[in-house]
Image (cartoon, rainbow, N blue to C red):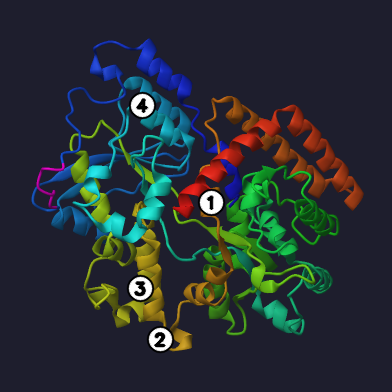
Amino acid sequence: MAKFSKAFHAALSITLVVVLALTGCSSNNGANSGVKEGTDNKPDSSKAAFVLGDQPLEFSFYGHYDWYTMPPWGDDLSTKWIKENKKVNVVPISSGGNAKQKFNTMIVAGELPDVIWMERNADVEKLRSEGMLVAFDDYLDKYPNLKKWAGEATLDMLRSSDGKLYQFPNWYTTQPNGNAGYLVNKKIHDELGKPSLETTDDLYAYLKLVKEKYPDVVPLEVGQSASGIDIMASAFAENRPYTYNAMMAVPSGDKLVSIFTDPVYRESIQYASRLYRERLISQDSFTQKAEQVEQKIVTGKIAVYAASSPTEYGAKGNALLAAKDPGAGYFITWPVHKAGLDKNKIFPGDYKQLGWNVSVITKAAKNPEAIFAFLDWFTGPEGQRLSMWGPEGIYWDGVDADEAPLFTDKFVNDVEEREALMASIVNFQWVGNTVYVDNSKMKFESTLPVEKRSWETYWQSEITWKTQLDTTEFVNLDPAGDTDEGIVGSSVFSIYEKSRAKAIMNASSDAEVNQILDKAEADAQQAGYEKLLKYKTEKWQENVSKLKK
């Protein structure tokens, strides 16, 4: 997945629509205000805490993504249990495959959903500044799970410019997590004599050998939109996550500077260009679909796969290949590095305390406190057990002193059924609690013999979690799409994408790669890149100050 594209392509560009909704349609008619008329949704800290299950709670939920369609609430075992035992019903609102248009339409019509699940970006602040969101501050002590598990530092990073908290984070963490790295085809590697894959030179030699011996195999798969190439930038410098590519800027002292002139970025693109020229990576890497990538991996038609989450397809492929041939499957290798660098300072991926995305509660909600109470319960131990492993009595039975589930024999032995259940509830994981879930998994896995352990969890504990860098300081650097800096950002992103593809696919030498990136730098500066870098630097330094508190 090309995470760097989210920063710009996921932008909602709602300002004009909001202005129209709030000014062009301004009247005393609450139907056009963007929230439901007459709703008393101000937090009241004097009220008794809302107890789930004492009375019914129903709210609408909109996932602001083209790809997201919420499954019917109550059809799976977990949400059925919640519906019956906690009396909670969630009504989905679909984006219809066009999230931006759907969202703008809801704002103009004054029909905001009760909850919006969305990217953590400048558009959340835009909604907040227009008075459309409910602050959570008065709820944090009444419903303590979020405050306990996320911690004050994480919540402070999520606070808006008015000092209040409006965002409920998803997969927040206080410990390393993530899967970015390199997946290796075990059978091919064994048959070629298990050559070293430590350095970029090792990798290059191995890919050439694969191409010679296995003409029907892709030596290096770099995924959809060639996103694996960004992962590989980490090999050319210590403490260099691909986050820098994603934000199109590189730290230098206390400033963020151009990525186009950065020596490490240039070297990584030169390396990728050489691999492409020599047909060591897929020639359709920039156009292939995710399904094509998955098919190659599950059928064993790749030798190495670099990705932000190679374990996703790797776990499936490993199970399928090993079922047919015990000597087949996949393993994760320690991240490759340029010769001379410290391998323990190479980080192909990153993690952020704030996690992935957020849920916000709008002022359309009739009872926002009850909704917050549900989300807080959902992010706590009981809610996480349900959202990850289903109701008690099937795959877990009781908890230990740390509230970790006591997994049953069925959890270990009925893998196919367990995976089916987990697949049925994965799209309800809106407020994931990384520390609770990961620690629960690892505690249980440590009690199992090696042959019974989860392939994915094993490699996470052995390599991937150890090789992800904390990049919390670089969150929320992107300007709103309608601002001067946002418009510049959109232009620079286009220059970045085009120059990256051209340098990799069309350059015939390292010198030509440099020429293409020189041109990209000139074009970016003409578009106002320096202004964007100044904005990002200021936001970065604000984050640094917050984290030092």
Q: Residue at x 46, y 23 (%)?
A: 15
User: What residue type is disc 2 on?
Assistant: Leu
Judged left or right of residue 279, residue 369 is left
Q: Kindly report the distance in space between the C-alpha atoms of the residues bearing marks 3 and 1.
A: 27 Å
Q: Residue at x 47, y 20 (%)?
A: 16
Mark 2 sits on what residue?
448
Q: For label 4, count other residues whose C-alpha is less than 10 Å away and answer few (under 14), some (14-19) or many (20+).
A: some
Residue 262 appears in the figure? yes
Magenta region's main secondary structure? loop
Query: Disc 4 vs disc 3: which is toward the camera?
Result: 3
Q: Residue at x 68, y 48 (%)?
A: 250
Rendering coords of residue 48 (x, y %): 9, 47
Q: Does the magenta-highlighted stretch encompass residue 62?
A: no
Asked whether disc 1 touches disc 4, contact meaning CB atoms under 8 Å apart, the reply is no
Mark 3 sits on what residue?
440
User: What residue type is disc 4 on?
Assistant: Met
User: What residue type is disc 3 on?
Assistant: Ser
